[in-house]
Amino acid sequence: MVSGEYYRLLWHRARRFLIRAKRDLDEGDYDGACFNSEQAVQLAVKALLYKYFGETPRIHGSKTLLARLRNLFMDAGRDDVAVLIGRFVSDYRDYLDILEESYTMARYGMLTYGEKQGRLCVETAEKALEVLMEVERRMG
């Protein structure tokens, strides 16, 4: 049996990272906006992986985590939610690449992000969390 408390904690943290990402964007900290957006997506996906499959993956990267979630739902016969996740990944592939890249580059790399990338990261994270909430609704 999975802990509802841990699931709720992950979702709470995901939402807090998204709030930080939006604040960073407003303040012109585009590296922070991208990094915090990636963190929000990772934690939200991990919340669902934990809730529905009892997994606590140590992997990072929003695309990798989303693919894992999609595949597990497909294996569980929930093609409706698997397709929803897959469509999001396909539609937002390039933006998810920026998010994943920012996980390390925004902290350690020579690469910096501008306003356009910061905005794309925040918008992508917002959309990802919307999709994941829709998965939750469909799962009942």
Image (cartoon, helix red, strand yellow):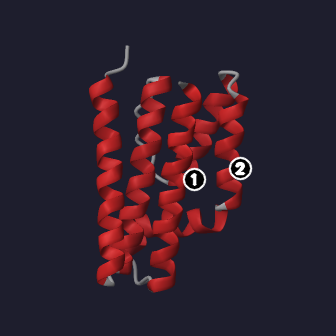
The residue that appears at 29% across and 54% down in the rendered structure is 16
Q: Nearer the viewer, mark 1 or mark 2?
A: 2
Is mark 1 in CB contact (under 8 Å) with mark 2?
no
Work out whether 102 lies above or below 83.
below
Say few, some or many: other residues with alpha carbon within 10 Å of mark 1 (under 14 / 14 to 19 / 20 or more): many
Label annotation for residue 121:
none
Which sits in the foreground, 22 or 34? Answer: 22
From the viewer's perspective, tell me whether residue 117 is left or right of residue 22: right
Left or right of residue 82: residue 65: left
Q: Position of residue 89 (x, y in %)?
A: 65, 53
Q: Quadrant of residue 20?
A: bottom left
* Secondary element type, mark 2: helix
Report which residue position mark 2 lands on. 87
Query: How far from the left and from the top, in percent, is residue 58?
Result: 40, 41
Which residue is denoted by mark 1 in the rendering? Answer: 63
Q: What amino acid is at disc 1?
A: Lys
Q: Is residue 134 above or below residue 95?
A: above
Location of residue 5 by image quarter: top left
**Three-letter amino acid code of the residue under disc 2:** Arg
Counting other residues with Cα less than 10 Å from the Cα at mark 2, is it few (<14), some (14-19), or many (20 or more)? few
Above or below: residue 114 compared with residue 83: below
Rounded to the nearest whole Å, what is the CA distance between mark 1 and mark 2? Answer: 12 Å
Residue 61 point in image, percent of width and height? 49, 54
- Residue at 43%, 45% in the rendered image: 44
**Looking at the image, which is closer to me, 60 or 69?**
69
Q: Quadrant of the N terminus?
A: top left
Q: Position of residue 118 (x, y in %)?
A: 45, 77
Residue at left offset 64%, top offset 44%: 85
